[in-house]
Image: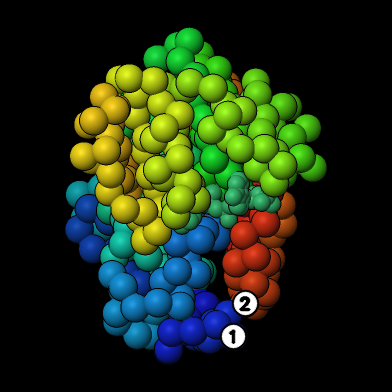
Amino acid sequence: MRAVSQDRLGDPDVLQVVEVERPVPGPSEVLVRVHAAGISPTDWVHRRLPGFLDQLPLILGWDVSGVVEAVGVGVTIHEPGDEVFGMLPYPHGHGSFAEYVTAPARTFVAKPAGIGHVEAASVPLAALTAYQALVDTAHIRPGQRVLVHAAAGGVGHFAVQIAKSLGATVIGTASAAKHELLRELGADELIDYHTEDFEKAAGEVDVVLDLIGGDYTARSLRTLRPGGTLVSLVLSQTTPLREEAAALGVRHRLMLVEADQAGMLAVADLLRSGALRPVVQASFPLDQAAQAHEVGESGRVTGKLVLEIR
Ligand SMILES: NC(=O)c1ccc[n+]([C@@H]2O[C@H](COP(=O)([O-])OP(=O)(O)OC[C@H]3O[C@@H](n4cnc5c(N)ncnc54)[C@H](OP(=O)(O)O)[C@@H]3O)[C@@H](O)[C@H]2O)c1
């Protein structure tokens, strides 16, 4: 099969299309023919830096939308021909920048019929991050004020919609040019971070999703009401602030997204109901993976980027 592989760490040009053996599903695994694979900052972090994945050559990619090609022994929930989507286990389950991938059967859930593979592939990792942060970590409730940083990005635009669907008042930070789209997606209040201090503009909030890190973490902590929760997602740039948080009567949690069947089922329901709409800025063929990474690494993407593999 064709795959995008790298035999060294570095800039986007380390990504090369190569021929590799098609994987075979083991017991309780499925083999999925990948139609599209979402691209995330997680991909370029691991493309560039030594970290959890040190074995080269390496095929990146955690987001999949495709069709079940074969099932391993004992799989009862999927069969060949099923259209599915899901997030491969992070970190070691990577490999969706390829024509086929194997993973535990419960990695995947049925793709909503009304959504194409490119849109579906944009969803799993980013929407699960937003869902696990808002629902499983912050336990958001209707009526709460939720501040989403980088609201126009991959995770942010899903977080805005998920928080809104759960009855929250949603405040987002983004460049002014992106405010109209975010209003359409349900944001109630928008802050242009280039011209306004978000601490002043947001007022008191119950939950913050920090998708930026650095000085945003301590500043975000100070926007919280007593009892509120700051969920930090950029672990590499975030100092844990448990003591400061305790002194203010708030919580600070660092979160890493996990492959999660219950979360995927909830996200799929939101897609079917229309409460969640993926925004795909652009899609690229497999042999333009390096260009896609360059665009993504600019940090200016609206919504998601996707590789179209079939
Ligand atoms: N912990 C986890 O499990 C986990 C999971 C997923 C992602 N992440 C991390 O979360 C971060 C965001 O991921 P993503 O996929 O959403 O990234 P992304 O799609 O690349 O985010 C791009 C967006 O960020 C906005 N942005 C950049 N600087 C900003 C600022 N100072 N204030 C407000 N918005 C700003 C940009 O808007 P403008 O053009 O307006 O600047 C752009 O729309 C990444 O660092 C990623 O590695 C962590």
Query: Residue sitting at 31 percent across and 45 percent down?
Result: 255
| SS for dot 1 | helix
Give left or right: position of 42 versus 243. Answer: right
The residue labelled by disc 2 is 290
The amino acid type, in three-letter code, at marker 2 is Ala
- In this view, the residue in front, 162 or 4, is 162
Look at the numbered disc 1 and say if its residue's Cβ is closer than 8 Å to ligand 1: no
CA separation in Å, label 2 and label 1 = 6 Å
* 81 in relation to 247, above or below: below
The residue labelled by disc 1 is 13
Question: Would you say residue 304 is visible in this rendering?
Answer: yes
Pointer 2 and pointer 1: residues touching (CB < 8 Å)?
yes
* 270 in relation to 245, above or below: above
- In this view, the residue in front, 178 or 12, is 178
Quarter of the image where one finds residue 91: bottom left
* 101 in relation to 137, above or below: below
Give left or right: position of 274 versus 29. Answer: right
Quarter of the image where one finds residue 210: top left
| Residue 246 x %, y % | 22, 31
| Residue 282 x %, y % | 72, 57
Quarter of the image where one finds residue 222: top left
- In this view, the residue in front, 269 or 105, is 269
Query: Residue sitting at 41 percent across and 26 percent down?
Result: 224
The amino acid type, in three-letter code, at marker 1 is Asp
Screen quadrant of the C terminus = bottom right
Q: Residue furthest top?
A: 143
Q: Residues within 10 Å of mark 1 (few under 14, many from 20)?
A: few
| Residue 165 x %, y % | 53, 19
Look at the numbered disc 2 and say if its residue's Cβ is closer than 8 Å to ligand 1: no
* 73 in relation to 2, above or below: above
| Residue 160 x %, y % | 57, 30
Query: Residue sitting at 72 percent across and 42 percent down?
Result: 195
